[in-house]
Amino acid sequence: DAKTTQPPSMDCAEGRAANLPCNHSTISGNEYVYWYRQIHSQGPQYIIHGLKNNETNEMASLIITEDRKSSTLILPHATLRDTAVYYCIVTWGKSTFGDGTTLTVKP
Amino acid sequence: GAVVSQHPSWVICKSGTSVKIECRSLDFQATTMFWYRQFPKQSLMLMATSNEGSKATYEQGVEKDKFLINHASLTLSTLTVTSAHPEDSSFYICSAMLAGPQETQYFGPGTRLLVL
């Protein structure tokens, strides 16, 4: 199963773009890249997913490299409410949710 | 769209009693639902996979007789914690999978269980 690697923490200034990287070098051809976030004491919230092409929705943009070995989640204008743990997922299983990246948006 | 609800949002019970948690997909049908558990300062761990009309598949180390799962309809799965003990106190979260090749899971808000 494909695994993901994310930096443990990142800071971002309010109003600036937050770029969260994820490495998934063992991803297989039919596996999607999913991004979720978990705000304290809540269930994970779906953000976006993609297979090959870059994707954009009302929450974020997802940039997937051509070789699909890494991706970047972009929050274009981070707010204080975007402070959360962000998870990059390619395979669902027992330990799908690793440590993620704790994003702290600062005033 | 793709909203999942859980009930109750929190529950306090005495040791030895049983607690039932409901998970509903409100605006879509889910043939597969999942139950996770999250202890303080830890990540979510998958407990079991629930398929509509069939027996749940439990992850290694999860007691199937203690955590009873029923998925009787395409929009409802229940988790019953039987003979709860303080060590079962945790944050229980369900998810429902939207049918299709993309396997996107949508999560409920979670149920916080405290066993005294």
Image (cartoon, coloured by chain):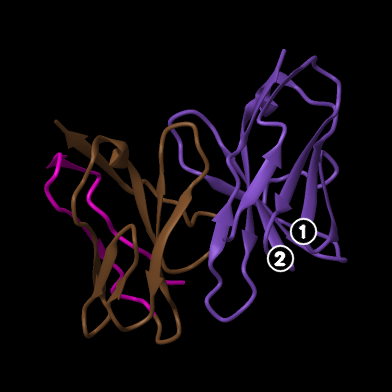
Chain colours: A brown, B purple
Work out whether A10 lies above or below B17.
Answer: below
Nearest the viewer among A82 and B64 is A82
Badge number at residue B75: 1
Left or right of residue A25, residue A40 in this image? right
Contact check, label 2 and label 1, Cβ < 8 Å? yes
> Residue B43 location, x and y as percent?
46, 42
- Residue type at numbered disc 1: Thr
The image position of residue B109, as x and y in percent, is: 58, 40
Vertical order, A99 against B25 (above or below): above
Quarter of the image where one finds residue B5: top right
Q: Is residue B84 magenta?
A: no
What is the quadrant of residue A48 in the picture?
A: bottom left
Mark 1: secondary structure: loop
Q: Is residue A15 magenta?
A: yes
**Residue at the disc numbered 2:** B30
Residue at the location (33% across, 57% down)? Answer: A59
Q: Nearer the viewer, residue B42 or B114?
A: B114
- Identify the chain of the residue marked 1, using the numbered disc in the image: B
Rendered residue at 69%/28% (across/down)? B88
Disc with the residue nearer the chain's start (2 vs 1): 2
Quadrant where the C terminus of chain A sits is: top left
Same chain? Circles 2 and 1: yes
Q: Which residues are magenta?
A: A1-27
Quick check: B116 left or right of A97? right
Q: Is residue B31 left or right of residue B95?
A: right
Q: Nearer the viewer, residue B59 or B38?
A: B38
What is the crowding at mark 1: few (fewer than 14 residues within 10 Å), some, or many (at least 20)?
many
Q: Amino acid at mark 2?
A: Ala
Residue pictured at 25% horizontal, 45% vertical: A8
Residue at coordinates 37% horizontally, 77% vertically from top-left? A27
